[in-house]
Image: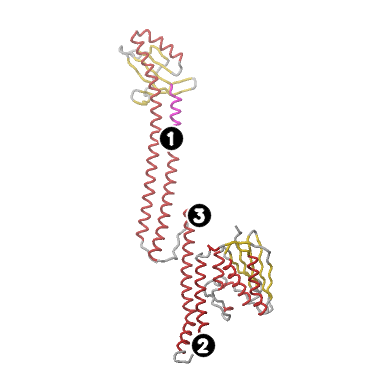
């Protein structure tokens, strides 16, 4: 089946754009966060260092105004009292007058405007210092340096942490892009398949499943099961329609012929009775179909009550025991005194009656039919076992279809709806039906849900 590729391309393009937009927004957020982390850290580092150096320079400027002789003792005192701070006081010609900085590097790094950075030897080894140079009115100048090794280390850690955050956010962005594109594309794929089914009516289409770890794949599996169920129901409707047309065409044609033959003939009570029997048989088929339909639609669930299954099975056995004896069969039962389940007693009675009727119908004279029930792993299990010809393995999947009649049942009376009713009642009560070989014969096992 050919489909228009344009809607699919549009959906894929739309999902890609949505995922891309989401990724861009996340990327911008990560970039802004990284910028502020690094920039604010650098600003705090510079602000603290420069403020401390400016205080020292301000103090020296005040002392220099009172006289240069007051500045050198102060520098000597400060250098010995605070190892974090280093000084160099030199004349206008560059001669060192005081301080612990012997020489400056030829090309110190510039941290920012007016603030230099260079290494100096300390007891712990070479460490970084931030410095500012102040020139006095007489041309002399002072260099004030402050140890910023710990601050720079903290700043480097902040940058590394910021880089790690950026890497993690990049990973989040990539994963988010993949997930968003995956989710949106899957949703669009589901929508495209649903739209195509609506437009074409082709229920054979299924959602592709290429993974099992995500919820959308689980949803796709549920939807595929939903589509399969709908397709099966539609196929069943077509089969039922065909079977109705096939199975009712012959009796309706015969009925019409018999009625036409009665025209201009004297009244024959026997012929009228035969026609009425045939009409009742046809009406019975329609009534059975309507009843199965109502059961399949769950309309009888409102009549669910507590049912004593032991009593119900005993009544079914009592009803069919005379018929079994008439056919030369022995009906054996093994039922506990009280088995409780929740359900519709009338429908359950009809279901077991149909199964027991089939067992009697297909059992040879002298055979034994066994009706048993009990608890297995907390579930009620019932078995109806006969010694007939059984059901071929190839037919077990078809015997519950409407109007289906196997090769062994074509010579027996019936309309092929008995087991369809059994299946409908069992599904209404959430029971499983198993067809097993009794060697010889057939064993029909029904497993009900625990009573609540």
In which image quadrant can residue 91 be found? top left
Vertical placement of residue 43 versus 410, above or below:
above
Position of residue 63 measured from the top left corner of the image (x, y, whole percent): 36, 10
Instruction: Write the residue at 43% across / 18% down.
Output: 85
In which image quadrant can residue 42 be found? top left
Task: State the CA–CA distance, disc 3 to disc 1.
Answer: 36 Å
Q: Can you tell which of label 3 and label 1 is closer to the viewer?
A: 3
* Residue position marked by numbered label 2 in the rendering: 271
Residue 16: assigned label: none
Task: State the CA–CA distance, disc 1 to disc 2.
Answer: 101 Å
Q: Is residue 252 left or right of residue 423?
A: left
Asked whether the residues under the numbered discs 2 and 3 touch, taking CB atoms below 8 Å apart as contact, a structural biologist would say no
Position of residue 79 measured from the top left corner of the image (x, y, whole percent): 44, 14
Q: Is residue 323 left or right of residue 303?
A: right
Vertical placement of residue 161 versus 244, above or below:
above
Task: State the CA–CA distance, disc 2 to disc 3.
Answer: 67 Å
Position of residue 64 measured from the top left corner of the image (x, y, whole percent): 35, 10
Magenta stretch: dominant SS? helix
Give the residues drawn in magenta, as a range. Answer: 147-160
Asked whether the residues under the numbered discs 3 and 1 touch, taking CB atoms below 8 Å apart as contact, a structural biologist would say no
Q: Secondary structure at mark 2?
A: helix
Earlier residue among tags 2 and 3? 3
Q: Can you tell which of label 2 and label 3 is closer to the viewer?
A: 2
Q: Nearer the viewer, residue 354 or 404?
A: 354
* Residue position marked by numbered label 1 in the rendering: 162
Q: Is residue 340 left or right of residue 257?
A: right
Vertical placement of residue 146 versus 224, above or below:
above
Q: Can you tell which of label 1 and label 2 is closer to the viewer?
A: 2
Q: Nearer the viewer, residue 177 or 273?
A: 273
Asked whether the residues under the numbered discs 1 and 2 touch, taking CB atoms below 8 Å apart as contact, a structural biologist would say no
């Amino acid at each position: 089946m050919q489909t228009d590729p344009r809607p699919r391309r549009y959906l894929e393009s739309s999902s890609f754009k949505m995922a891309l937009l989401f990724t861009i927004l996340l990327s911008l957020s990560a970039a802004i966060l990284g910028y502020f982390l690094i920039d604010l850290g650098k600003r705090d580092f510079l602000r603290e260092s420069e403020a401390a150096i400016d205080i020292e320079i301000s103090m020296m400027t005040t002392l220099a105004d009172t006289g240069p002789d007051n500045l050198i003792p102060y520098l000597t005192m400060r250098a010995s009292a605070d190892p974090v701070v280093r000084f160099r006081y030199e004349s206008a010609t560059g001669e060192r007058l005081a301080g612990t900085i012997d020489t400056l590097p030829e090309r110190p790094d510039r941290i920012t405007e007016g603030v230099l950075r260079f290494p100096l030897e300390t007891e712990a080894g070479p460490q970084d210092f931030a410095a500012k140079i102040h020139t006095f009115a007489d041309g002399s100048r002072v260099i004030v340096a402050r140890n910023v090794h710990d601050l720079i280390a903290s700043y480097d850690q902040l940058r590394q942490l910021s880089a790690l955050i950026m890497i993690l956010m990049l990973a989040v962005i990539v994963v988010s892009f993949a997930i968003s594109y995956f989710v949106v594309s899957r949703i669009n794929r589901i929508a495209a398949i649903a739209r195509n089914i609506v437009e074409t009516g082709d229920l054979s289409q299924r959602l592709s499943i290429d993974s099992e770890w995500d919820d959308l794949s689980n949803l796709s599996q549920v939807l595929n099961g939903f589509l399969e169920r709908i397709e099966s129901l539609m196929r069943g409707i077509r089969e039922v329609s065909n079977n109705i047309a096939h199975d009712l065409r012959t009796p309706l044609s015969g009925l019409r012929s018999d009625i036409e033959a009665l025209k201009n003939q004297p009244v024959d009570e026997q012929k009228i009775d035969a026609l009425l029997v045939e009409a009742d048989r046809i009406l019975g088929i329609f009534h059975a179909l309507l009843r199965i339909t109502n059961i399949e639609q769950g309309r009888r669930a409102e009549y669910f009550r507590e049912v004593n299954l032991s009593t119900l099975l005993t009544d079914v056995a009592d009803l069919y025991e005379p018929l079994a004896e008439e056919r030369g069969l022995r009906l054996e039962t093994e039922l506990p005194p009280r088995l409780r389940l929740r359900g519709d007693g009338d429908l359950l009675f009809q279901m077991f009656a149909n199964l027991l009727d089939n067992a009697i119908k297909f059992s040879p004279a002298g055979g034994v039919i066994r009706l048993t029930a009990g608890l297995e792993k907390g579930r009620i299990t019932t078995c109806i076992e006969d010694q007939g010809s059984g059901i071929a393995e190839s037919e077990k999947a078809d015997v519950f279809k409407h109007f289906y009649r196997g090769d062994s049942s074509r010579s027996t009376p019936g309309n092929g709806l008995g087991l369809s009713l059994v299946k409908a009642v069992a599904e209404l009560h959430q029971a499983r039906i198993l067809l097993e070989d009794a060697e010889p014969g057939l064993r029909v096992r029904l497993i009900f849900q625990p009573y609540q």
